[in-house]
Amino acid sequence: MDSVKFRVALSGDFRKPDGSPTYPDFDLEPLRNAAGVEMVFLESNSPLRADQLEDFDALILLAHRFDSTSVPRSGRLAVVARFGVGYDTVDVEACTAAGIALVITPDGVRRPVAVSVITFMLALTGKLLTKDALTRKGSHGFQERSEHMGVGLVGRTLGSLGIGNIGAEVFRLARPFDMQFIAHDPFADKRVAADLGVELVGLEDLFRRADVLSVSCPLSPQTHHIVNAERIALMKPTAYLINTARGPIVDQKALTQALQARRIAGAGLDVLEQEPPDAGDAILKLDNVILAPHALCWTDQCFAGNGAADVKAVIEVQHGREPRGVVNREVLSSELWKTRLSGLAARFGT
């Protein structure tokens, strides 16, 4: 019976220990009701074990790791659909070598993460947390209001390290603020940048010129600690740094030292180098940083969108069609992938 069904595995972290859904906004009914599909929740293991995946055609993956030891020997697994856009928990080379497509959900996270960047920008420049604390101090706090003036955005420079899916959306959302836009991205689509009114600049210029600098690039060996002490030192003392991408893109020790010395005005961090941080981490004690637990973009719409995109990708593969959001595009020309996809098309129709 298993050989007839298109079997879809979901990593065990999609369910709580009591069996209830971790994220109820991920609607699994379209997958449950799809013709010819069998859906199974795996045991919680990270990294996933190869023996768990031997009899599956597709995997929808939340936070558990999928590395070279996770690749099943059966040759049946066709697609790993990651819930989100970060894929630093997935061995991309191992997927490609095995003819497995790695899919992410750019449409699901584009707006929610971009909104997170704008949220940080407004909270930092408006000194929202400081003014909240002043209000709670009563009359003394009100007397101190003039000492905590916010920063207006008109004419100020918003910079982005990356102008891809999320970086471009940040600029779209920021248009009403009448800011100047700059970005650094060696892979930038110049037409997109021009349409958004974004000036493409060198890496050092980005750090020198930005009043608000947002990190919107993926984590890779090339971007690890790309925001380091040397580049932070280039920033204006009035500038703010925002990171909603991945913690290790920023050298957190260097950033902490800069914030402690007030060499930059502040930071908004949804991600840290270590998650969760140690209780004694110095970044937790700073009053010029706003922190979130890698969850600022977590909304009902974000999770519904990610889930819908993953389900759609899996169903496309079931019917022998190329899904959206493939990371390892080279796999699409491999004989392993083509053979697997044509076999699925023959079983389930296109």
Image (cartoon, rainbow, N blue to C red):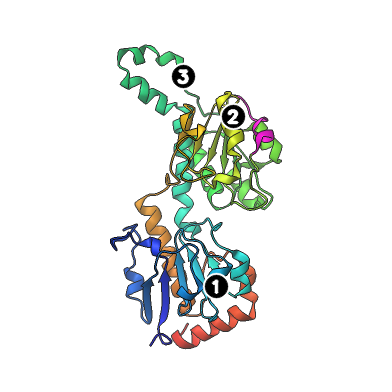
Q: Name the quarter where the N terminus is drawn.
A: bottom left
- Badge 3 crowding class, 10 Å Cα cut-off, few under 14, some 14 to 19, many 20 or more, is few
Q: Position of residue 312 (x, y in %)?
A: 43, 69
Please report whichever mark, 2 or 1, sits nearer to the chain's N-terminal start.
Answer: 1
Residue at 31 percent of width and 58 percent of height:
24
3D distance between C-alphas at marks 2 and 3: 24 Å
- Badge 2 crowding class, 10 Å Cα cut-off, few under 14, some 14 to 19, many 20 or more, is some
Q: Is residue 121 left or right of residue 129?
A: right
Magenta stretch, overall SS: loop
Element class at badge 2: helix
The residue to which callout 1 is attached is 71
The residue to which callout 2 is attached is 257
Q: Kindly identify which numbered label has been placed on residue 149.
A: 3
What range is drawn magenta here? 228-237
Q: Position of residue 287 (x, y in %)?
A: 46, 26
Does the magenta run of residues contain 229? yes
Element class at badge 1: loop
Q: Is residue 267 above or below residue 185?
A: above
Can the viewer see residue 276 in this picture? yes
Q: Amino acid at mark 2?
A: Gln
Mark 2 vs mark 3: give the one in front.
2
**Quadrant of the rendered structure where residue 160 is?**
top right
**Quadrant of the rendered structure where residue 20 is?**
bottom left
Q: Is residue 53 left or right of residue 225?
A: left
